[in-house]
Image: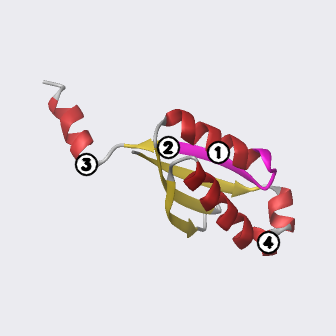
């Protein structure tokens, strides 16, 4: 599994329907699980984004499909970061020579 950090911003529609957002979060968790992934951690945050999700997905294509489907609902916009764990980071740096 690959880890991704998903940054979510509410759209105008998402803000207007904020009271329904816990139900949408549950649906988003199920959607990713049905794709073979997992929304491992979820945070409401203050600053440039409204929510942060730490997700595991089988590959980049699954994660891309997931955030496109969420965005298509019209309640959030997303930015997705592929995360490298410490062991991969160390291996990448070691390969620099």
Disc 2, SS = strand
Give coordinates of residue 70: x percent, y percent: 71, 49
Q: Which residue is mark 4?
A: 20
Give coordinates of residue 35: x percent, y percent: 57, 46
Q: Which residue is mark 1?
A: 67
Magenta segment: does it hold 77?
Answer: yes
- Residue visible at 79% across and 71% down in the picture: 20
Give coordinates of residue 86: x percent, y percent: 25, 48
From this view, report whether residue 26 is shown above or below residue 4. below
Q: Which residue is mark 2?
A: 81
- Residue visible at 80% across and 50% down in the picture: 73
Mark 4–mark 1 distance (CA, rounded to whole Å): 19 Å
From this view, report whether residue 32 is shown above or below residue 94. below
Mark 4–mark 3 distance (CA, rounded to whole Å): 37 Å
Give coordinates of residue 51: x percent, y percent: 61, 62
Name which of mark 4 and mark 3 comes first in the sequence.
4
Q: Which residue is mark 3?
A: 86
Q: Tell me whether the residue at label 4 lies in contact with that at label 3, contact meaning CB atoms closer than 8 angstroms.
A: no
Q: Tell me whether the residue at label 4 lies in contact with that at label 1, contact meaning CB atoms closer than 8 angstroms.
A: no
Question: Given this view, does label 1 or label 3 mark the residue nearer the observer?
Answer: 1
Mark 1–mark 2 distance (CA, rounded to whole Å): 11 Å
Disc 4, SS = helix
Question: Given this view, does label 1 or label 2 mark the residue nearer the observer?
Answer: 1
Q: What's drawn in magenta, residue-wise?
A: 72-80
Name which of mark 1 and mark 3 comes first in the sequence.
1
- Residue visible at 80% across and 75% down in the picture: 19
Counting other residues with Cα less than 10 Å from the Cα at mark 4, is it few (<14), some (14-19), or many (20 or more)? few
Mark 4–mark 2 distance (CA, rounded to whole Å): 26 Å
Name which of mark 3 and mark 2 comes first in the sequence.
2
């Amino acid at each position: 599994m690959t880890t991704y950090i998903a940054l979510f911003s509410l759209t105008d529609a998402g803000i207007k329907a904020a009271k329904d957002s816990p139900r949408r979060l549950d649906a988003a968790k199920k959607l990713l699980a049905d794709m073979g992934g997992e929304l491992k951690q979820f945070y409401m945050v203050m600053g440039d984004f409204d929510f942060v999700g730490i997700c595991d997905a089988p590959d980049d294509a699954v994660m891309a499909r997931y955030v496109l489907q969420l965005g298509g609902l019209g309640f959030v916009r997303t930015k997705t970061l592929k995360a490298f764990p410490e062991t991969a980071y160390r291996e990448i740096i070691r390969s620099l020579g």
